[in-house]
Image (cartoon, helix red, strand yellow):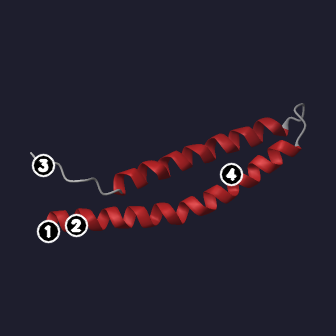
């Protein structure tokens, strides 16, 4: 029971941390998309913005993985 309680606390903490990180990441990713849309295709900075957006997507995926880990799964009756 103690171990289950600790795991539950870890899951809650992971979810809390993930939500705190997810909001600023979404804001930065949105701003990058706006900048990317305003830059002409032949501008050399376009590649930099696309790489930044790709890295933001990696962070977002890691956060989603953390949220999935923290999500309470229904009990399996055997």
Q: Residue at image x 25%, y 53%?
A: 74
Residue 70 found in image quarter: bottom left
CA distance for labels 1 and 2: 6 Å
Mark 1 or mark 4, earlier in chain: 1
Q: Nearer the viewer, residue 38 or 51?
A: 38
Q: Which residue is mark 2?
A: 6
Distance from Cα at disc 3 to Cα at disc 4? 42 Å
At numbered mark 1, what does the secondary structure look like: helix, strand or loop? helix
Residue placed furthest toward the top: 42
State whether residue 47 is above or below residue 52: above
Whole-angstrom CA distance, mark 2 to mark 3, is 22 Å
Badge 2 marks a residue whose secondary structure is helix
Q: According to the image, label 3 marks what residue? A: 77
Residue 72: x and y, percent? 30, 57
Residue at (90%, 31%) from the top-left corner?
42
Q: Are marks 1 and 2 in contact (CB under 8 Å)?
A: yes
Q: Which mark is residue 33?
A: none
Q: Does label 4 or label 2 sit earlier along the sequence?
A: 2
Q: In this rendering, is residue 49 above or below 13?
A: above
- The answer to the question of whether label 3 and label 4 lie on touching residues, with beta carbons closer than 8 A, is no
Secondary structure of the residue carrying tag 4 is helix
Q: Which residue is mark 1?
A: 2
Give the position of the C terminus as an image quadrant: top left
In the rendered structure, which disc, 2 or 3, sits on the residue that comes first in sequence?
2
**Tag 2 near tag 3, CB within 8 Å:** no
- Across and down, in percent, residue 60 comes to 55, 49
**Viewport quadrant of the N terminus:** bottom left
Which residue is denoted by mark 4 in the rendering? 29
Q: Residue furthest left?
A: 78
Q: CA distance from mark 1 to mark 3?
A: 21 Å
Q: State if disc 4 and disc 1 touch (CB < 8 Å).
A: no
């Amino acid at each position: 029971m103690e171990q289950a309680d600790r795991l539950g606390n870890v899951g809650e903490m992971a979810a809390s941390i993930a939500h705190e990180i997810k909001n600023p990441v979404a804001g930065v990713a949105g701003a990058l998309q706006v900048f990317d849309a305003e830059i002409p295709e032949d501008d050399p900075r376009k590649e930099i913005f696309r790489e930044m957006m790709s890295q933001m997507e990696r962070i977002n995926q890691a956060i989603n993985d953390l949220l999935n880990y923290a999500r309470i799964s229904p009990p399996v009756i055997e």
